[in-house]
Amino acid sequence: MRSRMKWFLVSVGWVLSVAVLAQDTLILQDAVAMALEYNQGIRVAYNDREMAANNATPGNANLYPRFDANFGGDISSTDVRQEFAGGQPGIDVKGAGTESWNGNIGLTYTLFDGLGNINYYKWLKEVATLADVQTRMQVELTILQVVTTYYATAGLAVNVDITRENLDISQDRYERARNRYEFSADSKLSMLNARVDLNSDSVNYIQAVQNLDNSKRDLNVLLGQDPASEFFVSRQVQINGDLDLQELLDNALVKNAELLVFQQNVAVAERDLAVAKSFHYPKLDLNASYGTNQTFNEAGFLLEQGNTGYTAGLKLAIPIFNGNQRSIQVKNARIALESNQELYDEALLRIERDVRNAHQIYRPNYYIYGMEQQNLE
């Protein structure tokens, strides 16, 4: 038993010494930088923000005229037989060919639609702003996870050292108790108790190493790295002792990303309502085109015909009745606006509560930290 335990401790010590030489120390600033560059959730958020920005254009809101070029043609072969009154000679042609070619360039532009296209453009811009704020919130949440996991890993690394020291002490105690028992200087019960403590400390040490390895893998995933990557974390912690509650509240109510998301949802809902109201107004479109149409016949009196010219016109569509769908859209948009406003008000209260609770936890713990520093000295 004694020789096996020594071999176990020597082996574990050798593995840890090799790991120390192979691992690099990861400081918190580098961990945050890696997460910003490689975290998959942040990358997806950046893509969503880019797509929303791409959509927020006047052309996507139909504020620009639409130009279309159309070309077509038909070729046919038919048997033609025609008889005319007044003694005119008839026509009888087998497989007479006919060709028809046409092409035009058309313009369509909405002159008025109840400001629907303008409000839709503003809606697209609000959605783009919302995506930007959501990206910021995703970044902040990820950084929070990185910082929390980083310091948790540092704490678990310290716990591994402590359990290792306890294991060394228990090993030494067991060896002394065993020696005393062998020389009849102590009872067997003392030796067995020391062995139980040694086994318990061995289990604690193994579990501490496992917890540290799991925390490292969690941090690697947040950093977008291979879960098996090895590293050390710095155990130096800088604590800000100057946190004013009112300043924290003021900053949170103005800059908090979650609150800004709810605020932006209200702005998007307001634009939704404006777009829904525009459906009640008439829509006036301008249409213009320039085109040509050419036809060639192998049989008949009209062997060739061509038309080329301009066409322009206005189209007015007046909504009269569509089963109250437009009214329902307006009502639902108004309800959605009220709901988003309620959610924003709720977020205001919740964030103020969270800041106050966090500060209330911070103050006594910072005091305890100072007392423990004195005790350590």
Image: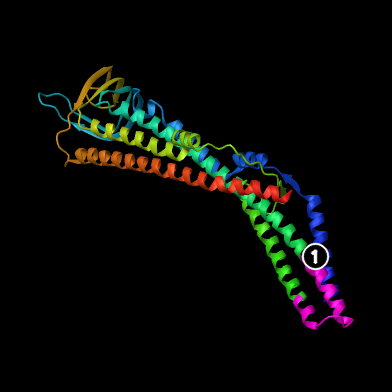
Q: Nearer the viewer, residue 119 or 186?
A: 186
Region rendered in magenta: 167-193
What element does badge 1 sit on? helix
Is residue 318 among what the camera can see? yes
- Residue 174 among those drawn in magenta: yes
Q: Reply above or below: 220 against 173.
A: above
Question: Dominant secondary structure of the magenta stretch?
Answer: helix
Is residue 99 among what the camera can see? no
Q: Position of residue 134 (x, y in %)?
A: 46, 39
Q: Which residue is mark 1?
A: 168
Residue under the image location 67 percent in, 40 percent down: 30
Q: Is residue 244 left or right of residue 160?
A: left
Residue under the image location 32 percent in, 36 percent down: 269
Q: Position of residue 27 (x, y in %)?
A: 69, 42
- Residue 129 among those drawn in magenta: no
Q: Reply above or below: 99 against 198.
A: above
Q: Is residue 240 left or right of residue 110?
A: right
Q: Classify 10 Å Cα crowding around label 1: few (below 14), some (14-19), many (20 and above).
A: some
* Quadrant in which the N terminus appears: bottom right
Q: Nearer the viewer, residue 57 or 223?
A: 223
Name the image quarter holding residue 198.
Answer: bottom right
Q: Reply above or below: 77 against 8.
A: above
Residue under the image location 32 percent in, 39 percent down: 341
Question: Which amino acid is tagged 1?
Answer: Asp
Name the image quarter holding residue 96.
Answer: top left
Q: Nearer the viewer, residue 360 or 86?
A: 360
Q: Position of residue 266 (x, y in %)?
A: 35, 36
Q: Reply above or below: 132 against 101.
A: below
Specify the farthest residue to the right.
183
